[in-house]
Image: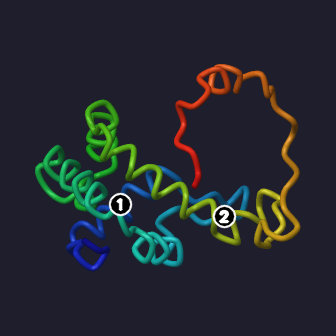
Amino acid sequence: MSADNLTRIQRDDLRTIAAMIVPASDEYKVPGADDPAIQADMLATLGRDTKLVAAALDHLARLASQPLAELDVARRDAVAQEFREAGGVAAATLVRVVLQCYYRDDRVLRSLGIELRAPFPKGHVLPDGDWSLLDPVKARGGALRQIP
């Protein structure tokens, strides 16, 4: 299943819920997740998540008894709250898709002070972590599959 399989209503609802998840900010000069470029990125990269995103959008429409995009703001908020409580894996997938596409938009990265470049070959410095957290895994010995 691909993003092409989303109906016009599902696409409208995706845009609506995306704006609710990440609204535009004049203060930080960033678009909302309903921005056309961000929406295009979402639709172009849905891939394996298409089925769960479509299920989440259908669940939203059922809760709303009509397309989410057609509801007034107060009713939308009530439906979104109900969806958060009962949406399950499909809801989590929808939120993840919205956030991953939003936070890879150049305008958003600029607003966060992140250099616009690929992470490789320069890399990004990560702080050292607590390597002892891996001790239980190491203690299991050969529980992991060996690479031939």
Q: Is residue 8 left or right of residue 43?
A: left
Residue drawn at x 78%, y 57% is: 112
Q: Quadrant of the N terminus?
A: bottom left
Residue drawn at x 72%, y 56% is: 27
- Residue 6 place in picture, x, y as percent: 24, 72
Q: Is residue 13 left or right of residue 100?
A: left
To which residue does mark 2 refer? 30
Residue in front for this viewpoint, 84 or 54: 54
Residue in front for this viewpoint, 4 or 78: 4
Residue 74, compared with residue 26, is above or below; it is above
Which image quarter: residue 12? Answer: bottom left
Which image quarter: residue 144? Answer: top right
Q: Is residue 22 left or right of residue 87?
A: right
- Residue 35 place in picture, x, y as percent: 51, 71
Mark 2: amino acid: Val
Residue drawn at x 57%, y 45% is: 146
Mark 1: amino acid: Asp
To which residue does mark 1 refer? 49
Pointer 1 with pointer 2, Cβ within 8 A: no
Mark 2 Cα shell of 10 Å, populated few (<14), some (14-19), many (≥20): some
Distance CA(mark 1)–CA(mark 2): 26 Å
Q: Regarding mark 1 in the picture, which secondary structure is present there?
A: helix
- Residue 39 place in picture, x, y as percent: 45, 72
Label 1 or label 2, whichever lies nearer to me, is 1
Residue drawn at x 59%, y 23% is: 140
- Residue 148 place in picture, x, y as percent: 57, 55
Residue in front for this viewpoint, 73 or 109: 109
